[in-house]
Image: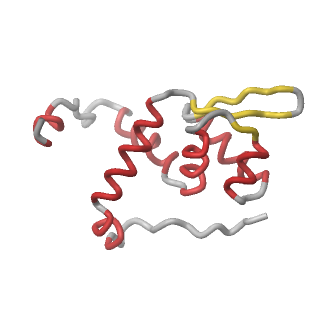
Amino acid sequence: MSKTARTASVTPLLGEGDDVGTVAKFFRALGDPSRLRLLEFLLDGEHSVSDCVAHIGLSQGRVSTHLACLADCGYVRARREGRWCYYRVADPRVAELVMLARALAADNGAALAACERIDGPEPHRDRA
């Protein structure tokens, strides 16, 4: 199937109220490198907040804030067990989305690197 044929099957969002804003917000949730790393980490299964802290290398407070954002946006679900909280990906399509985004970013790496309108990955300021 040609690129044009695939694109033609997508219903445009322009002129449909808040749909464009909602989709933009959907992508903004993934726009933070730490949230994206957490989401990718959760693709292989359920993990505790402590696991996420050890994996990403940020403070527990920052990790919890990022996980709460991902949960609020519907990307992950939380499960409480006593004092512990475990997170997992809420929808299997998230894995497809992440893999597609990685493939598109790889295919467009030079253009993304040269883009001056959007900042690159932010450095990790609050390692703890």
Residue 106, position as x, y percentages in the image: 34, 58
Who's the residue at 65% across and 47% down the image? Answer: 66
Residue 83, position as x, y percentages in the image: 89, 33
Residue 33, position as x, y percentages in the image: 54, 57
Q: Residue 105's quadrant in the figure?
A: bottom left
Who's the residue at 58% across and 50% down the image? Answer: 35
Q: Residue 87's quadrant in the figure?
A: top right
Residue 118, position as x, y percentages in the image: 40, 65
Is 74 placed above or below 39 here? Answer: above
Task: Quadrant for the C terminus, please.
Answer: bottom right
Is 9 placed above or below 104 here? Answer: above
Task: Quadrant for the N terminus, please.
Answer: top left
Left or right: residue 5 compared with residue 93: left
Is 85 placed above or below 100 here? Answer: above
Left or right: residue 22 compared with residue 107: right
Query: In front: 46, or 111?
Result: 46
Who's the residue at 67% across and 40% down the image? Answer: 68
Left or right: residue 96 compared with residue 123: left
